[in-house]
Image (cartoon, rainbow, N blue to C red):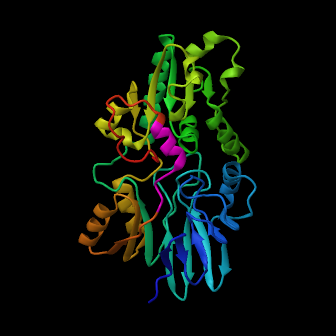
Amino acid sequence: MTDLVVVRKEGLYCVPGQFYIDPWRPVDHAVITHAHADHARVGHGHYLSAKAGVGVLRSRLGEINIDGLEYGETISRNGTKISLHPAGHVLGSAQVRIEYRGQVWVASGDYKIEPDRTCAAFEPVRCDTFITESTFGLPIYRWSPQQEIFDGINAWWRKNAAEGRSSVLFCYAFGKAQRILSGLDAEIGPIVCHGAAQALTEVYRASGVALPATVMVSDISDRSELKKAIVIAPPSAAGTPWIKRFGDYSDAFASGWMQLRGARRRRGVDRGFVLSDHADWPGLMSAISATGAQRVIVTHGSVATMVRWLQQVGLDAGAFDTEYGDDADEKNDAATIPLQTGDAATGSDHA
C-alpha cells in the first residue's frame, strides 16, 4: 500500500491530502504541530494548528493565515480526514492523525507523557503507522516526577533568598519557562521574567493558563527585593548587562540534558535541574506501544538506536531524515550560555 506521508525537500508531505506537516521550506498548506521554531516557520501560504496553539503561533510568526482546530475535531482535505490530538509538549501542541482509505497514520511532533498544568495532556491515538520523535531516545534518559523537580527548584530558591542573593534559572522561554512558573512557590519572593519569557507568559495567560504573578526587573523599585527574587531567563541572557544587574546571584539551568554530568559541567552553572518537555525513554516506549502501530518511523534525536530497538521488539521500524531538533532560538541559546571547558555542548537544547 502506498505511504500516506513521505519526505520531500520541503518537509513531511501527505500525498493524498496534498499538505505538509511542519515543513521547513515555504509551502501552500502547512499543518503545524507546535510553535517551536524548528516546527513552525514563516512563509507558508496557509497554516492549520490546534486552536489552543493559534495565539502562540501568531505571537512568534506575526500575522499569518491560520485556522485552528479543536482537539479531536475532524476536517476533510482531498479525501483524507485530518484531526489533531494533544501531544502534551507545550501550549497548543498536537499530534496529527491522517486517515485515508482505511489507513491511519499519526505524526507525533514533539511530545511528553507526564501531565503538565500549562497544556493539554498527551493522548494516545491508535494508528497503523506512527511517526515519532526521539530526542531522548536512549535508555539512560529517565525523568523523575516533575513535582520532585519543582520542590528542588523551590528549595534552591528559598535557600538563596535566605542568604540574600537572587536565583537565576536559565530555561527555554517558550514552554519550559511557563511550566516552571506553574510549579513555583510565590510565597518565597518576587518572580522576575526576562522580556522574552514574559511576552510568551502573557500569551499563556490570555489562553486561560493560570500562572503566578510575574514582573519585569524594571517594575521593582526596591532593589533589595531582587535579593529574594527568582529570575526566569533564556540562556542567551547569560553574561549580558541585563543579568549583571542582579549582582551576587546563584544560577541554574533546567533541561533534560542536565541528566548528563558532562553537560552540567560544561554549562558552568551552580545547579542543573533535569526537566524536559520531551518524553524520556520509558515515555517513548509507552507512547509507541499505546498506538498499537505495527510500523514506526523515527525522526529527530537518537534515530539509529530507536530504530534498532524497535526492530528487535518486532516492529517494522524505519526513519525519516528531517530538519527538526534544530531550533534556531535554542542554537542561539547554546552559543551564548557560558561553557567552562571550551568543547561543544552535548545535543540540542530543545529539551
Residue 180 in percent (x, y) is at 53, 37
Q: Quadrant for the N terminus, please.
A: bottom left
Residue 111 in percent (x, y) is at 48, 56
Side (left or right) of 85 relative to 64: left
Q: Is residue 210 visible?
A: no
Q: How many marks?
A: 0
Q: Is residue 177 visible?
A: yes
Query: Magenta part of the protein: which range?
Result: 323-335
Above or below 8: residue 111: above
For this rendering, which residue is in front, 130 or 145? Answer: 130
Secondary structure predominantly adopted by residues drawn in magenta: helix
Instruction: Identify which residue is drawn at 27% across, 65% down.
Output: 309
Q: Is residue 47 magenta?
A: no
Instruction: Identify which residue is drawn at 66% across, 29% down.
Output: 214
Residue that extends furthest to the left in the rendered view of this protein:
312
Instruction: Identify which residue is drawn at 45% across, 41% down.
Output: 146
Residue 192 in percent (x, y) is at 62, 26
Q: Quadrant of residue 337?
A: top left
Above or below 320: residue 236: above
Above or below 156: residue 319: below
Q: Quadrant of residue 261?
A: top left
